[in-house]
Image: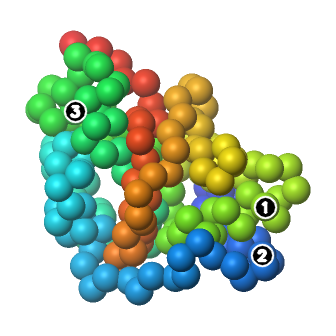
Amino acid sequence: MTTYVHWALVPLAVLSLAACGDGKTDAGPAEPSSRTVTATLHGNSDFGTLERVLTNAGLSDVLEGTGPYTVFAPADAAFTAAGSDADFTTEPMRAQAAALLRAHIVPGALTRADIGAAIDAGGTGIVQMRTMADTLLTFSRDGTAIVVTAPDGASAHLTGSEDLAKNGVIQPIDALLIKPAPAA
């Protein structure tokens, strides 16, 4: 219980660190949408596979809930590039789909500016956040890009424009943050 509470506070610490930044952002804060994370994903054609994975995993209702959540959302091209035989949209892959999604979600609503400010304020050039799968994602910079790395070494760049939903943030990424297991 203590460990869970401790790690549940990580997004709050990141936001606190972000408040210590110089106040500069890349494009300024966007206004949150009136739509939920699930509805926002549904409305974006780049995330068709992710939406089907979300439905298969039975987690659509979770991302319709109060939140907030930050979803590091692999675009359709990331699923294709993974080249796996695992199709996370099929019934036999339901448990793996849920595990994949939990590895891509952190509690709290974290904008790219928040993450960047936390990296800069930390003094080490990295910041870590605990996922809903109880693993740590490590964030660092590669030039001006923000890179997220999973414990198994899988990494992705934050790409495109983030979407602010009423219950969280969708951060597009260019790769999966777990190495998919082959289909059974």
Residue mark closest to the camera, 3 vs 2: 2
Residue at mark 3: 88
Circle 1 SS class = helix
How far apart are the alpha carbons under marks 3 and 2?
39 Å
Viewer-side residue, 138 vs 143? 143
Q: Answer with mark 1 or mark 2, whichever residue precedes in sequence.
A: 2
Residue at mark 1: 120
- Amino acid type indicated by mark 1: Asp
Tag on residue 21? Answer: 2
Mark 3, residues whose alpha carbon is within 10 Å: few (<14), some, or many (≥20)? many
For the residues labelled 1 and 3, say whether their Cβ atoms are less than 8 Å apart. Answer: no
How far apart are the alpha carbons under marks 1 and 3?
36 Å
Rendered view: 137 above or below 64 = above
Q: Give the residue displayed 80% in from the left and 50% down from the top.
A: 125
Circle 3 SS class = loop
Along the horizontal axis of the image, is 103 left or right of 9?
left
Q: Quadrant of residue 59?
A: bottom left
Viewer-side residue, 107 vs 179? 179
How far apart are the alpha carbons under marks 1 and 2?
8 Å
Give how far across and how far down residue 53 sits, in percent.
21, 43
Answer whether residue 9 is visible to the viewer in this image: no
Q: Quadrant of residue 86?
A: top left
Q: Answer with mark 1 or mark 3, whichever residue precedes in sequence.
A: 3
- Amino acid type indicated by mark 2: Gly
Give how far across and how far down residue 146 sits, in percent.
60, 51
Along the horizontal axis of the image, is 108 left or right of 20?
left
Circle 2 SS class = loop
Q: Give the residue displayed 50% in from the left and 39% down from the top.
A: 156
Viewer-side residue, 174 vs 50? 174
Rendered view: 95 above or below 42 = above
